[in-house]
Amino acid sequence: MAAGGVGLPLVTGVTSHGADQLIVSEPKAGSHWGYVAAWGPQEHASDEVGTVVFYRLDSVVGAPVKDGQTLFVQFISKTEAHYVSGARWVQEGKNVPGYQGVRDIDGFKAWLEQTRSELDAPVKIAQ
């Protein structure tokens, strides 16, 4: 590694546990974003939780990689990366009247696609 440089590839992703379902985004016409995600029970409780990393398609090298413990992408640049991480939990907002949270994997997948669409059309603030 050169002095002051980054020697290893820059990666991001999600961890995978035995019962997790891994999700890789399908190509979507006009979208600049992809994602890798995991959905499954927490380690110390039976509640399900989903974790995700959204990434700019033009920022990564190749397809997502599964190595048995993680699902990850590698960035082209070692100093610049465009990604957003998030999580959803089945108990999230459960006691809030009228709150429609993510309660199962189908809801999580719908939220993933909705969030990807929002990333493709960011809010712009005019002065």
Image: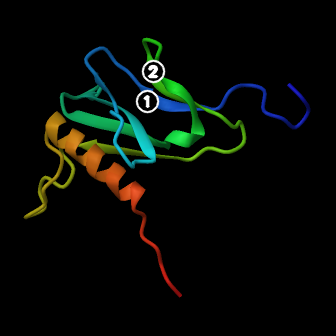
In the rendered structure, the answer to whether residue 34 lies left or right of residue 78 reads left
Q: Amino acid at mark 2?
A: Thr
Instruction: Give the quadrant of the N terminus.
Output: top right
Give the percent coordinates (x, y) of residue 123: 42, 70
Residue at image x 72%, y 42%? 79
**C-alpha span from label 1 to label 2:** 6 Å
> Residue 120: which numbered mark, if any?
none
Q: Does the image show residue 53?
A: no
Residue in the foreground of this view, choosing between 106 and 42: 106
Seen as rendered, the residue at the extreme bottom is 127
Give the percent coordinates (x, y) of residue 55: 48, 42
Give the percent coordinates (x, y) of residue 83: 52, 45
In the rendered structure, the answer to whether residue 89 lies left or right of residue 28 reads left
Q: Is residue 100 above or below residue 10?
A: below
Q: Under tag 1, what secondary structure?
A: strand
> Residue 70: which numbered mark, if any?
2
Residue at image x 20%, y 44%? 110
Q: Amino acid at mark 1?
A: Val
Seen as rendered, the residue at the extreme right is 3
Categorize mark 2 by other alpha carbons within 10 Å: few (<14), some (14-19), many (20+).
Answer: some
Residue ID for mark 1: 14
Specify which label sits upstream in the sequence, 1 or 2. Answer: 1
Residue at image x 24%, y 47%? 111
Q: Does the image show residue 98?
A: yes
